[in-house]
Image (tube, rainbow, N blue to C red):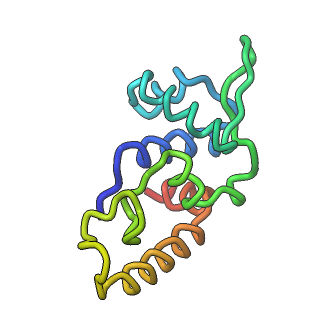
Amino acid sequence: MAVNTKTEYALRILIELADKGKMSAQRICDSQRLPKKYIEHLLSMLKAAKIVHSRAGSLGGYFLSRKAENISLADILAAVEDGTFDTACESESSRHCIGEGCRLTMFFLELNERLHQVFQSYSLADIVKIYNKG
């Protein structure tokens, strides 16, 4: 299963914040070896989705807006607008949909719902725990 870079990098950002608390964008980039301009863009998306907050100043930085246990993978995917896993025919990523009268529509809707349930079942805390095992 392919994960796009927006999701991968957002997860790396959030893992850093969950592990280390408040951090600057530069420190996140240095720790994860990520491009700063892209990370700043993702941080603004995560901030708009109220997953992270920021504080300016020498003691400032980015930090989680709520406990890692209360941030789901579904929240993260929505924040970075990752529709990669959206199988519903009505979605913008309906690359497989042939249009009206498709007899697979109900299957894709059910598959989409099950995927969403799986993504909802993983919290950032779960992901951090798995990440730290590696």
Q: Quadrant of residue 72?
A: bottom right
Quick one: quadrant of the N terminus?
A: bottom left
Identify the residue at the far top of this view. 58
Q: Is residue 28 left or right of residue 59?
A: left
Can you say whether 134 is above or below 108 in the image? above
Percent coordinates x, y for residue 22 in the rendering? 69, 31
Q: Which residue is rendered at x = 72% and y = 20% of the image?
A: 60
- Judge by depth and name the residue closer to the eye, 42 or 125: 42
Rendering coords of residue 126 (x, y %): 59, 63
Q: Position of residue 122 (x, y in %)?
A: 57, 67
With respect to residue 118, does 61 lie above or below? above
Label count reads 0
- Residue 18 location, quadrant: top right
Residue 70 sits in quarter:
bottom right
21 over 130 or under it: above or below: above
Q: Nearer the viewer, residue 20 or 4?
A: 4
Image height check: is 75 above or below 53? below
User: Residue drawn 39% across and 64% down?
Assistant: 85
Nearer to me, 94 or 15: 94
Q: Residue at x 71, y 34 (%)?
A: 53
Residue depicted at x 75% and y 17%: 59
